[in-house]
Amino acid sequence: MDRRQFVRAAGTAGALATTSLAGCLGGVLNGVTGGGGSVSEGEPAAYNAWIGAGTTDGAGGIDVSSASGSILRRDWGSAQENQRIQDDALAMSVTEWAVPIGWLSQALNPKGIAKPTADGSNTDRFTLVNGTRVFEGDYDTDAIRQTQERNASRSEEYEGYTLYIDGGATTAVSEEAVLYVSDEAAGVDDATARIEATIDAATNEGTRFAAEHEAYDELQSALPIRGYSGVEFDPDGGVLEGDSDRDFTTLQDTDLDPDVLGFAGSSSIEEDDMTASVALRYPSADAVDDRGTIESELGQEADERAIQIDGPLVIVEGEYRALSED
């Protein structure tokens, strides 16, 4: 997939769109900001409730994407095809998550639920948590259960959810959400066990990943909630190791310290303007790249940029304007 095809896929999915951000940034975007002070002006991420100790991949890391349903049902045109975004590691680091969530939201989903991208879909938010698809919205759960009962080989109850097992796939249905996972998903050996672990995360504070990893907790709550968000984290670090071998620029292609523990993204696009934010969590304050390196690697193509450093946490935010005119 070349650069233009990649970004068009993200744009078609609409996964970066959201409403206007007026008032969300609190005047942060006034140029490069100094260190010190708190950078915890974000909010708990919408996906955080679904990430538990048992929902990690085989290596213990997490890779999560989340988008509001209204975002997935929009197409904001050609702004995402802009070369400045494709050449900018800050912008592309958050755009990159749009492809899997955009494609999977249109792919095979639980029987009885319309695709989140379809007109009239009741999905308020679609989240991909290490292979588990989480659908939140105003659904007719009785109709979904009836559909599942006709197709599943067996069912069982778990923590207020009805689990429907159909071969290597499991669907969980409740008034709160509908979850779906298949044994074929990367890093999933047992679909039913994975769904149960995801439900545990949402129903039991003690099982949440954030309760066990302070660094991840800082990441997931560092940025404002926007239409699209994501996080990649590994408690052992090294999330930026290796080259991305992509035709577009990613964080792996930068000179940032590859041993960062993780990074989170939050983004929006309104017509031809995009706001992209990334929070990076280093192993320690001493491991943080110097300001000059951060400035040279992230957000160079932005019309306005803010960089904030607080101990081991770094937040970079950029605004990209009039993208379709370049």
Image (cartoon, rainbow, N blue to C red):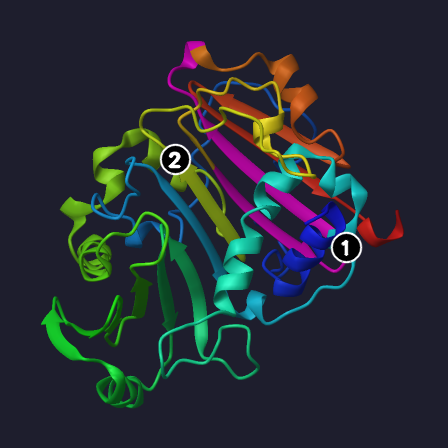
Tell me: 125 left or right of 90: left
Based on the displayed image, in which of its 4 quarters is residue 160 positioned?
bottom left
State the extent of the magenta-drawn residues as a range.
264-286
Tell me: 167 left or right of 38: left
Q: Helix, strand or loop at disc 2?
A: strand
Give the crowd class for mark 1: few <14, some 14-19, many >=20 residues within 10 Å: many
Based on the displayed image, in which of its 4 quarters is residue 308 positioned?
top right
Give the crowd class for mark 2: few <14, some 14-19, many >=20 residues within 10 Å: many
Rendered view: 320 above or below 271: above
Tell me: 256 left or right of 171: right
Alpha carbons under labels 1 and 2: distance apart: 29 Å
Of residues 120 and 63, the one nearer the viewer is 63
Any mark on residue 199, and which? none
Q: Amino acid at mark 1?
A: Ala
Where does label 2 land, which residue?
233
Is residue 124 visible to the viewer in this orientation of the structure?
Answer: yes
Residue 278 x %, y %: 54, 36
Instruction: Please give the name of the residue rendered at 36% of the width and 50% of the height, measured from the top-left corner.
Output: 130
Instruction: Please give the name of the residue rendered at 42% of the width and 20% of the height, measured from the top-left corner.
Output: 312
Q: Amino acid at mark 2?
A: Phe
Where does label 1 land, which residue?
79
Residue 22 x %, y %: 63, 53
